[in-house]
Image (cartoon, rainbow, N blue to C red):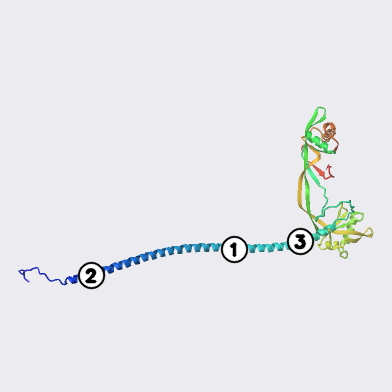
Amino acid sequence: MSSDEDFSLVTTPSEESLEGIQASINSFKKKYEQLLDEQKELNANREDLCEMKEKCKQRTEKIKVDIIKDKQSHVKNLANEKMKLAKLEQEEKELEEEIQRVIAAVKDEKANNLHLKQEADVFAAVPEREVIFKGQTGKATNSQDYEMEAHIVYPMEGGTALITFEEEVVAKKILTTKKHQVDLGGDCSINVEAREVHLIVPELVEIDSQVCPRRILISNLPKMETDTLLNKLEIHFSKSKNGGGEVEECEMMSDSGTVVLTFVGNNIASGLTETEQHEVKLQQKKHKVRVTPFINGKITNVKTKMSVCPRTVLLTGIPVVMERDTLQDLLEIHFQKSTNGGGEIESFLYNPLGEETMAQFEAVPPKSEEEE
């Protein structure tokens, strides 16, 4: 092609006619409407998905809450089961303890039966005494009462004296005056103070008595030389043909006139006490002696109380101004005189300064008092 060629605008006829354009428009309208319908469907599907998502979310939350509740319920049920298990274990332990208590109670009952048997032996072992019915009766008790006399040791401080008057009213007068001036002769006198005497005395003493398995008590014995009597008894009860055995000790109880015989073995004493009366050769002839169980006593309960001596007065503040005996005589003379508020004196004990003296009080009949 050469550069000299000439160009001109050429118009070509339209590929489509007006009807074709109209048809295209209608086609695009249909497509648009289809797109709108699809958009509406997509929107509807999106709303459904959102609603489904919300429902899933709510369901998930509900499931979480249910899981938490189930977990809490499981923990609670587990705790309850543990409590039930612990309760069952406690009940089992209590049942075992109850079984042990029952076993112990059976043992105690057996021991109590043995103790009652021993108590029966104890009653049988009490030495025989003649008694007279005085026309009075008392309530029966399950325990055995023993009469005991109290011996109370009272430590005296230095420069003090104890005075026991025959009448309680005299002691009250001396205590009421309290301060006393004692004339010792000439221009010499001393001042003393009167005080009450307080003693700790036994109010109740309980003794558990048991039969000794190795000792016997022999009573109803004739009057004879002690050593000879003990030798005769030991020879007799050491022989197996008399139901005896090897003797460890034979002792005379001087306060009751009975003899305590101790064997080496444990089974001999019980065999002898089954037969109460035994014939023993004493004083060239046979004499019936009484053989009973020997009682061992153990103090199980002691109750004490503070008691005021009604007829005894404690004098304090006594100086050492003369010989002991002379001063004691002058004090006793002073408090015997009714003009000094005194009266008849039953006993008098003076302990000078720097010395130690123990006064002994003994039980006496009601409304009276003894002092040594």
Where on the picture, by quarter, is residue 200? top right
Residue 318 in view of the camera: no
- The answer to whether residue 215 is left or right of residue 15 is right
Q: Nearer the viewer, residue 58 or 318?
A: 58
Compared to residue 75, the image places residue 366 above or below, namely above
Label disc, if present, on residue 111 of the rendered structure: 3
- Label 2 and label 3: CA atoms lie apart by 124 Å
- Label 1 and label 3: CA atoms lie apart by 40 Å
Label 1 crowd bin: few (<14), some (14–19), many (20+), radius 10 Å: few
Compared to residue 150, the image places residue 342 above or below, namely above
Identify residue for label 2.
26
Three-letter code, disc 3: Ala
Three-letter code, disc 1: Lys
Label disc, if present, on residue 44 of the rendered structure: none
x, y percentage for residue 294?
A: 83, 57
Element under disc 3: helix
Label disc, if present, on residue 84 of the rendered structure: 1
Q: Residue furthest right?
A: 284
Residue 188 in view of the camera: yes
